[in-house]
Amino acid sequence: MSQDNMIKLECTECKRVNYFSRKNKKTLKGRLEMNKYCKYCKKHVKHKETK
């Protein structure tokens, strides 16, 4: 995977980076938000894209 398409997803509750993903930056201009499982919180919480 190319590094310019890589994004980090951070938990909104515990502020830990749990997931790495990629997105098409030409079509998606805003920050990505997903509901993912956090192994530290032990529940599904919203994860936001970080820098």
Image: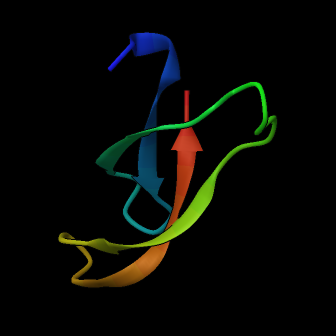
Q: Is residue 6 above or below residue 34?
A: above
Q: Nearer the viewer, residue 10 or 13?
A: 10
Q: Nearer the viewer, residue 33 or 22?
A: 22
Query: Where in the figure is residue 14, as x and y percent of width and height?
Result: 37, 63
Q: Residue at x 56, y 54 (%)?
A: 48
Query: Where in the figure is residue 32, as x and y percent of width and height?
Result: 64, 50
Question: Quick one: quadrant of the C terminus?
Answer: top right
Q: How is the image coloured?
A: rainbow
Q: Quadrant of residue 3?
A: top left
Task: Report the side of 34 relative to 26 (left or right).
Answer: left
Task: Report the side of 46 relative to 21 (left or right).
Answer: right
Q: Is residue 32 above or below residue 43?
A: above
Q: Residue at x 40, y 41 (%)?
A: 21
Query: Where in the figure is residue 40, as x and y percent of width and height?
Result: 19, 70
Task: Report the side of 14 relative to 51 (left or right).
Answer: left
Q: How many marks?
A: 0
Task: Report the side of 24 relative to 38 (left or right).
Answer: right
Question: Quick one: quadrant of the N terminus?
Answer: top left
Query: Where in the figure is residue 38, as x and y percent of width and height?
Result: 28, 71
Q: Is residue 34 above or below residue 17?
A: below
Q: Nearer the viewer, residue 42 or 5?
A: 5
Q: Residue furthest bottom?
A: 43
Q: Residue at x 45, y 69 (%)?
A: 13
